[in-house]
Image: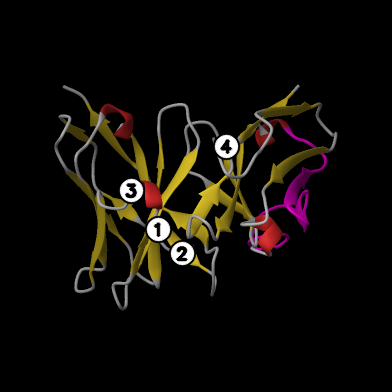
Amino acid sequence: QSVLTQPPSVSGAPGQRVTISCTGSSSNIGAGYDVHWYQQLPGTVPKLLIYANSNRPSGVPDRFSGSKSGTSASLAITGLQAEDEADYYCQSYDSSLSGSVFGGGTKLTVL
Amino acid sequence: QVQLVQSGAEVKKPGASVKVSCKASGHNGISWVRQAPGQGLEWMGWITTYNGNTNYAQKFQGRVTMTTDTSTTTTYMELRSLRSDDTAVYYCARREGSGEPNWFDSWGQGTLVTVSS
């Protein structure tokens, strides 16, 4: 079981908006640690999508946005496109484990 | 973007050790992340290249060692006492950010380690 909980799957039609949640606890997100998000297209290496809760690396479309509140974080994707179909992972730090932790991952299906 | 080049696939027997390399430059530290077939990402630990400091995930403490050779800008991850559930793709990734949690903005291509008798 992952320390950070993500829904196993989400789906949406092209053009729609979807959100992926990442729920933690008082020893990780709730303790104020940042959350980062990664996208892993099928058969490829993970790619940094959002860092420090809401910052996009150069080259990431502004259709992707991140937020954090309390013990949870969210990744929002607007204007859904077929190429967004991928696995998405959140990452934070857990003080009880003294290390980084990943969520279990969410598979996004574009209908 | 920094390029990280990892060593090739390995096949090992249970109980053996594996050492995966990751050649990269222009970074202060490297993390190792693994992904079992069909599963999610799992953080294994990090090493700071300029002073060799390490931080290993509790799950792997006592079984993993990360080292770095600054002369060749190569970082190594050795995992011992391999079990079948260690079969996974092992990634190195560049650590960025001034404090925990670092984020990983460049990744190696991955090294498949298969543990099978």
Q: Residue at x 22, y 36 (%)?
A: B82
Tags 2 and 1 touching, CB below 8 Å: yes
Q: Secondary structure at mark 4?
A: loop
Mark 3 belongs to which amino acid?
Phe
State the separation of the CA atoms marked 4 and 1: 18 Å
Question: Residue A109 vs residue B64: left or right?
Answer: right
Q: Which mark is residue B95?
A: 2
Task: Judge depth for marks 4 and 1 and give the one in front.
Answer: 4
Indicate the chain on which mark 4 is placed.
Answer: A
Number of marks: 4
Q: Residues within 10 Å of mark 3 (few under 14, many from 20)?
A: some
Q: Amino acid at mark 2?
A: Arg
Residue at x 27% of width, y 27% of height:
B84
Report the magenta stretch's main SS.
loop
- Please state the horizontal and vertical placement of residue B100, each as a whole percent of the image: 54, 67
Is residue A58 one of those drawn in magenta? yes
Chain for disc number 1:
B
Query: Mark 3, mark 2: which one is toward the viewer?
Result: 3
Q: Would you name the residue on which mark 4 appears? A: A104
The residue positioned 32% from the left and 78% from the top of the image is B50
Mark 2 or 1, nearer chain start: 1
Task: Say whether residue B113 is magenta.
Answer: no
Magenta stretch: give its range: A52-81
In the picture of the structure, the residue carrying the numbered disc 3 is B60
Residue type for callout 4:
Gly
Q: Which mark is first along the chain, 2 or 3?
A: 3
Residue type (three-letter) at the residue carrying disc 1: Ser
